[in-house]
Image (tube, rainbow, N blue to C red):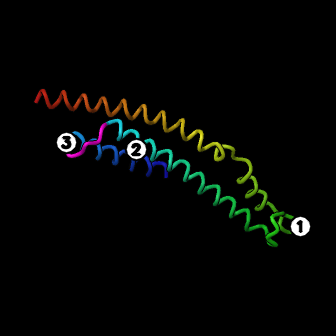
Amino acid sequence: MLILFLITQFLFIFYLNRLRLKGNSKLSINKIALFSSLLTYIITVASTSYLNLKYQSELDAFDLNKDGLFSGNEINEEQQKAMRKVISDTGRNFAPFTGILISMIYYIILLLTLSLINKMSKNYSINN
């Protein structure tokens, strides 16, 4: 999933930057980088929310009498594994906060990269 996301991001950025360099779009480098980093943040938060829902539904499947508690025959090794998935991953809980940091770093790197590409393409078009 991560590889698919990275490929999609690369193609999206490449396409928007190409449109911008050809003059067919009024998108600035800043807007491209900002939109891409926002997309990164949204996908990060959405994927962790999906995992939270998935793990919770797997755990809820063991609650046979639907009382919200596990007792007697509801507790087994599979239920304990599902419970560990739900309660032991703090990374999913902090994903909205770490997602902001990752998106900001991604934005800066992308902005610098697109600026460099822009300078190189202007130098290339001047020389040719």
Residue 52 versus residue 84: which sits nearer the camera?
52
In the image: residue 103, left or right of residue 36: right
Amino acid type of the residue tagged 1 in the rendering? Gly
At x 45%, y 36%, the residue is 106
Labels 3 and 2 touching (C-beta < 8 A):
no
Q: Give the quarter of the figure containing the C terminus.
A: top left
Marker disc for residue 35: 2
Residue 98: where, in percent of width, then height? 58, 39
Amino acid type of the residue tagged 3 in the rendering? Gly
| Mark 1 lies on residue | 72
- Secondary structure mostly taken by the magenta-highlighted segment of the chain: loop
Whichever of labels 1 and 2 marks the residue nearer the N terminus, that label is: 2
Residue 122 versus residue 24: which sits nearer the camera?
24
Residue 60: where, in percent of width, then height? 73, 65
Amino acid type of the residue tagged 2 in the rendering? Phe
Q: Secondary structure at mark 3?
A: loop
| Mark 3 lies on residue | 23
Whole-number angstrom distance, CA of label 1 to CA of label 2: 51 Å
Q: Is residue 24 on the magenta stretch? A: yes
Q: Secondary structure at mark 2?
A: helix
Report the mark closest to the observer, 1 or 2.
2
- Image: magenta residue range: 22-28
At x 49%, y 48%, the residue is 2
- Report the residue that reaches farthest toward the bottom: 65
Q: Secondary structure at mark 1?
A: helix
Whichever of labels 1 and 3 marks the residue nearer the N terminus, that label is: 3
